Every structure is written in structure tokens, then in C-alpha cells.
Image (cartoon, rainbow, N blue to C red):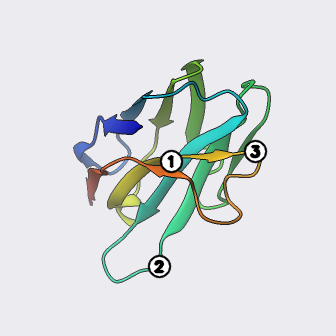
Amino acid sequence: VQLVDSGGGLVQAGGSLRLSCAASGRTFNNYAMGWFRRAPGKEREFVAQITWSGGVTSYAKSVEGRFTISRENVNTWNLQMDNLKPEDTALYYCVAKYGNYLQYGEPDYWGQGTQVTVSS
């Protein structure tokens, strides 16, 4: 099983980036998909998730209203990040976890991470 995340980069505050994750090696039915991030010197933080059906999304309060998670198909999902702030700077990981609650417990699968840097 492999998760490949992409789309990170350097952007000015107020700008946008779109992250993508492509999963392979199995079919991810009944898995919640999403993103975590880790900023330098900080704990890992849940960012967003979407259920396998695509019907339910949830976000960290720090990104709600600015980030949008979507699912193209059962093995591909995206994170649209708008109005980025310097505090969004982190290594972003796409993740997958069996069930509906990605933000609780340890994800089953992780991508390799993609760096997002927001300059002020």
C-alpha cells in the first residue's frame, strides 16, 4: 500500500495551494481519508478528513473556512488551501484510517509528506 502526496510549495500569505493524494495497493472502501501536518517544534496536528462515501467532512478549527477537502474517487483526494497564513507552514501528510473518524487514534497509512511554506 502506498500513499503519494504532492502539491506543496512556497506561497505568500493570502495565497492558495492544492494538495493531492493518490493511494494504491488496495481499495480504500470504508476508509476515512485526510491530512495531518507537523510544524517545526510542534506536535502533529489533524487538519481535515472526509469519509469514504465523501458525504461527511471535518476540519481543525484553525483551518475551517479556508481549507476544503474533496474526494475524486475512492483512492484519490485533495486539499484546497486558500487564504494561507504563515502559521500554516508545515509538512503535510495525507493519511487513511479504517472507519469514519480519522482524527481519533493512529492512521493506518501515511504518505511521505509534502512541504508547505507560507511567507509573510
Instruction: Pick out the residue farthest to the left.
Output: 10
Instruction: Give the x, y percent position of residue 26.
Output: 51, 28
> Which residue is tagged 1?
95
> Which residue is tagged 3?
99
What element does badge 3 sit on?
loop
Q: CA distance from mark 2 to mark 3?
A: 24 Å
Residue 43's label in the rendered image is 2
What element does badge 2 sit on?
loop
User: Badge 3: how crowded within 10 Å, few (<14), some, or many (20+)?
Assistant: few
What element does badge 1 sit on?
strand
Instruction: Give the x, y percent position of residue 76.
Output: 49, 24
| x 42%, y 37%: residue | 1
Instruction: Give the x, y percent position of residue 44.
Output: 48, 71
Instruction: Pick out the residue farthest to the top.
Output: 73
Is residue 17 visible to the viewer in this orientation of the structure? yes
User: Badge 1: how crowded within 10 Å, few (<14), some, or many (20+)?
Assistant: many
Mark nearest the camera among 1 and 3 is 3
| x 57%, y 56%: residue | 107
* 57 left or right of 19 in image: right
Kind of residue at badge 3:
Gly
Is residue 16 visible to the viewer in this orientation of the structure? no
Tell me the quarter of the picture where residue 104 sits. bottom right
